[in-house]
Image (cartoon, rainbow, N blue to C red):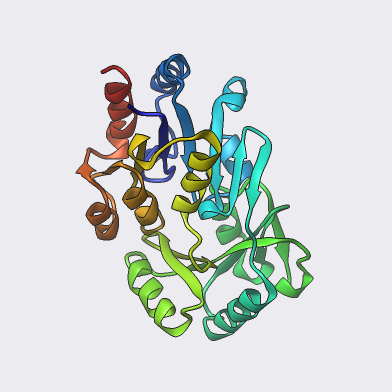
């Protein structure tokens, strides 16, 4: 019996145009409500950005595992926050210094932050993922609880860079958030942490969870859920972690599979 369905956003729920089939979403939410199935948006993206993707009338029915598991909410009710401690932030500043030629983002509770020197085009691109974005001259200006640090890479290089960084800095977690970005967070922090918390809170077993993903930051979630699906365009590590493969997000494969599972 399915009691929880969790989906990643970019490359999974959202198609290449950052859109999805709203009619199918409404059908999914109707069936989920009737059957008592919890619908979870599990993403490395900012919570405030995720909110903009869904109709407000469904907010009370939505659960969020945002910032790769560090920020868990039911609607607007905060269930859990896990931010980086000072020792972990000091390591991140070391990484920032070592890779100073690459564009970066800090993700915090109140906002995401990036540097003015990266230019307007990069900042505009970030608004696809962050609803709240603050541009600063230096990260020392930031006074916030920080979840995550992201480093941009060349397209197709994120997985390799994540492995390299993990070897050099084993006290932090490194995953490919996409094929062109590495997400750095607290050791052991991932989307499965959020699913585990929801499972404990609502008495849901792993075997009663279904997860959908496509990136390196989905691996732990895909392995944790009893049933999991990777999209056709998923990174190799996500495909290896999943139980099943489905079509691409451009084909609404996730929405179709959810409707199939909920209609059985």
**Picture layout, residue 115 above or below residue 248:** below
Quarter of the image where one finds residue 204: top left
Q: Evaluate whether residue 138 shows in this view.
A: no
Q: Residue at x 71, y 61 (%)?
A: 145
Q: Which quarter of the image is occupied by the N terminus?
A: top left
Q: Residue at x 42, y 44 (%)?
A: 8
**Picture layout, residue 242 above or below residue 105:** above
Q: Which quarter of the image is occupied by the C terminus?
A: top left
Residue 59 placement (x, y as % from top left): 60, 27
* 104, 175: nearer the viewer: 175
Quarter of the image where one finds residue 166: bottom left
**Picture layout, residue 190 above or below residue 87:** above
Q: Residue at x 45, y 69 (%)?
A: 174
Total of numbered circles in the picture? 0
Is residue 3 toward the left or the right of residue 244 in the image?
A: right
Residue 131 placement (x, y as % from top left): 64, 45
Is residue 109 toward the left or the right of residue 28 in the image?
A: right
Residue 80 placement (x, y as % from top left): 63, 48
Q: Evaluate whether residue 197 shows in this view.
A: yes
* 171, 180: nearer the viewer: 171
Residue 101 placement (x, y as % from top left): 53, 80
Q: Residue at x 35, y 28 (%)?
A: 2
């Amino acid at each position: 019996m399915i009691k929880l369905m969790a989906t990643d956003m970019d490359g999974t729920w959202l198609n290449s145009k950052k859109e999805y089939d709203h009619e199918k979403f409404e059908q999914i939410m109707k069936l989920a409500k009737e059957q008592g199935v919890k619908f979870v948006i599990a993403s490395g993206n900012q919570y405030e950005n995720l909110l903009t993707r869904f109709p407000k009338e469904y907010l009370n029915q939505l659960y969020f595992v945002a910032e790769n598991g560090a920020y868990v909410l039911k609607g607007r009710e905060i269930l859990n926050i896990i931010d980086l401690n000072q020792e972990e932030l000091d390591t991140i500043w070391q990484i920032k210094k070592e890779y100073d030629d690459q564009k970066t983002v800090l993700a915090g509770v109140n906002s995401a932050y990036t540097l003015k020197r990266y230019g307007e085009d990069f900042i505009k691109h970030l608004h696809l993922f962050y609803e709240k974005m603050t541009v600063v001259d230096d990260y020392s200006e930031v006074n916030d609880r920080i979840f995550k640090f992201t480093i941009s890479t060349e397209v197709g290089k994120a997985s390799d860079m994540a492995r390299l960084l993990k070897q050099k800095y084993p006290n932090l977690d490194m995953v490919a958030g996409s094929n062109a970005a590495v997400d750095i967070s607290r050791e052991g922090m991932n989307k499965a942490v959020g699913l585990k918390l929801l499972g404990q809170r609502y008495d849901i077993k792993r075997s009663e969870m279904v997860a959908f993903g496509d990136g390196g930051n989905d691996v732990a979630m895909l392995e944790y859920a009893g049933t999991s699906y990777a999209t056709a365009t998923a990174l190799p590590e996500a495909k290896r972690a999943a139980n099943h493969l489905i079509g691409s997000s451009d084909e609404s494969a996730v929405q179709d599979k959810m409707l199939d599972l909920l209609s059985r």
